Image (spheres, rainbow, N blue to C red):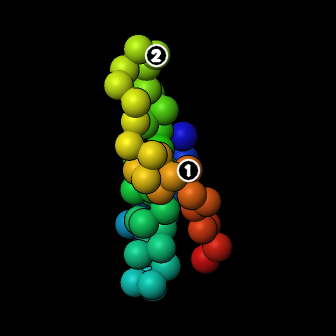
Amino acid sequence: MLKLAAMLRRFAEDATDRGYAAKFLRAAIEVEMRAEFLAGHRAGEPEPDWEHQAALHAPVDLRI
C-alpha cells in the first residue's frame, strides 16, 4: 500500500494539471492513512473509534 501511495505522490508531483495533482495527492494521503492504520492495529488494544474506522474503510475514488 505504501508503494501505491508513493506512486500516487509521484504522479501528483509530475502532473501538469493542478486538478489531477490534487486528486492524486488526496488519494495518496488516504492510502497512506489506511496503511498506517492496518500496520498499527494490534489485538488487545482498546476498542477503536468506529466513526474513524468507517472513514478509513470508505472507498478511495481513484478516478482521474
Indicate the amino acid at tag 1. His
Secondary structure under badge 2? loop
Whether residue 48 can be seen here: yes
> In the drawing, does residue 46 fall left or right of residue 3?
left
Q: Residue at x 45, y 84 (%)?
A: 19
Indicate the amino acid at tag 2. Ala
Q: Position of residue 23 (x, y in %)?
A: 48, 73
Q: Position of residue 48 (x, y in %)?
A: 40, 36
> What residue is pinned by disc 2?
43
Q: Which of marks 2 and 1 precedes in the sequence?
A: 2
**Neighbourhood count class around disc 2 (C-alpha, 10 Å): few under 14, some 14–19, many 20 upward:** few
**Label of residue 4 in the image:** none
**Neighbourhood count class around disc 1 (C-alpha, 10 Å): few under 14, some 14–19, many 20 upward:** few
Please determine whether, in this image, residue 11 is positioned above or below residue 48: below
Please determine whether, in this image, residue 19 is positioned above or below residue 45: below
- Which one is nearer the viewer's eye here, 26 or 17? 26
Name the quadrant containing residue 29. Answer: bottom left
> What residue is pinned by disc 1?
57
Q: Position of residue 14 (x, y in %)?
A: 43, 69
